[in-house]
């Protein structure tokens, strides 16, 4: 088996002060991973700064911003590594062994991505996406955008993230589609990535897109037999969990419904019921042993573009 190669991809726009920490910690990673910065139309001199301060870093600049998701898709297609490590420009590796350790977590062809342990240091000291123990591979429902590694070949096979999400929920959508093909997100066993969440964040916009994209995620992916219940519970939780942002959340829900029915590029393509119920089970438990996960049919691997219908699999796991 050939040794996997790695690319660290950092997508950025107008945050060169934050970016320096991300690049510095990437340069110290063992194994000599490719370091690739994708400048999504910055106006603050980001690209000039990188060329002068970090000539060894691979750089691509877009003249006009295409948005975070589109930028990540383009960057993934340009990176050369087998495994793409994605961190935000306001994040940093806490230890120089993280890339090597996470590459070692891809122990099975069933593992399509690894959720790297991380700390949102400006929110809480809690360590997120930590497995229950390091002796058993555990899988989870999804990874976080600022701290994950994924197989490039599967990412390209799935056409990456869906651009119409624009921002937020694209990782959840990608992970359930990947699960639908029989590939899992493993919880990583490395030291954490530290995320220094930037204060330059529009909370109203975040709540708006969280609501819009949760609606799109539901209408896009949830099997017909579960759709009404999932949508009802989802809307209730969106409103209940975002107190103080009722207006942007309500606008997001309505915009999601409108976009789904009016945007011709958004076509309903539900995952099979087995994948849906396993995804729900992992969200509730946060982690299950890889050995307990069902092995999806080999035909799904041979023909990854083929989708299963609601009746292709029995329901093994409850809501």
Image (spheres, grey):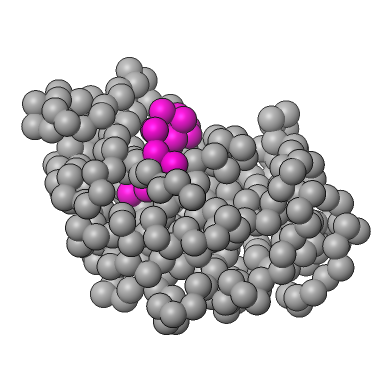
Nearest the viewer among 209 and 308 is 308
Residue visible at 45% across and 46% down in the picture? 2
Drawn side of residue 212 relative to residue 130, left or right: right
Q: Position of residue 172 (x, y in %)?
A: 56, 55
Magenta-drawn segment? 70-87
Nearest the viewer among 103 and 275 is 103
Q: Position of residue 284 (x, y in %)?
A: 60, 76
Q: Position of residue 135 (x, y in %)?
A: 44, 80
Residue visible at 24% across and 66% down in the picture? 121
Q: Quadrant of the C terminus?
A: bottom right
Q: Quadrant of residue 179?
A: bottom right
Residue visible at 14% across and 28% down in the picture? 55
Q: Is residue 236 visible?
A: no
Nearest the viewer among 275 and 292 is 292
As for residue 304 lying within the magenta part, the answer is no
As for residue 84 lying within the magenta part, the answer is yes
Drawn side of residue 141 relative to residue 53, left or right: right
């Amino acid at each position: 088996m050939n040794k996997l190669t790695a690319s660290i991809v950092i997508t950025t726009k107008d945050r060169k002060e934050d970016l320096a920490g991300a690049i510095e910690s990437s340069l110290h990673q063992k194994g000599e991973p490719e370091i690739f910065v994708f400048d999504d139309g910055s106006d603050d001199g980001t690209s000039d700064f990188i060329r002068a301060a970090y000539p060894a870093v691979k750089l691509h600049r877009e003249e006009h911003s295409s948005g975070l998701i589109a930028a990540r898709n383009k960057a993934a297609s340009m990176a050369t590594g087998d495994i793409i490590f994605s961190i935000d420009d306001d994040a940093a590796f806490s230890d120089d062994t993280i890339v090597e350790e996470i590459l070692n977590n891809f122990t099975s062809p069933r593992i399509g991505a690894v959720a790297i342990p991380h700390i949102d240091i400006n929110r809480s000291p809690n360590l997120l996406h930590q497995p229950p123990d390091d002796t058993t591979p555990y899988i989870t429902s999804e990874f976080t955008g600022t701290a994950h590694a994924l197989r490039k070949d599967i990412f390209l096979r799935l056409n990456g993230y869906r651009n119409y999400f624009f921002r937020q929920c694209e990782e959840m959508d990608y992970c359930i589609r990947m699960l639908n093909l029989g590939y899992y997100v493993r919880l990583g066993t490395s030291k954490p990535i530290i995320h220094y969440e930037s204060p330059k964040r529009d909370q109203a916009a975040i709540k708006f897109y969280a609501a819009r994209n949760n609606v799109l995620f539901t209408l896009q992916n949830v099997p017909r037999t579960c759709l009404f219940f999932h949508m009802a519970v989802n809307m209730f939780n969106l409103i209940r969990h975002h107190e103080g942002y009722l207006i942007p959340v309500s606008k997001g829900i309505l915009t999601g419904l409108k976009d789904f029915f009016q945007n011709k590029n958004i076509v309903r393509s539900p995952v099979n019921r087995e994948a849906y119920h396993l995804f729900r089970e992992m969200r509730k438990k946060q982690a299950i042993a890889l050995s307990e996960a069902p092995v999806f049919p080999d035909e799904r691997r041979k023909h990854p573009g083929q989708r299963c219908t609601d009746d292709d699999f029995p329901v093994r796991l409850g809501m």
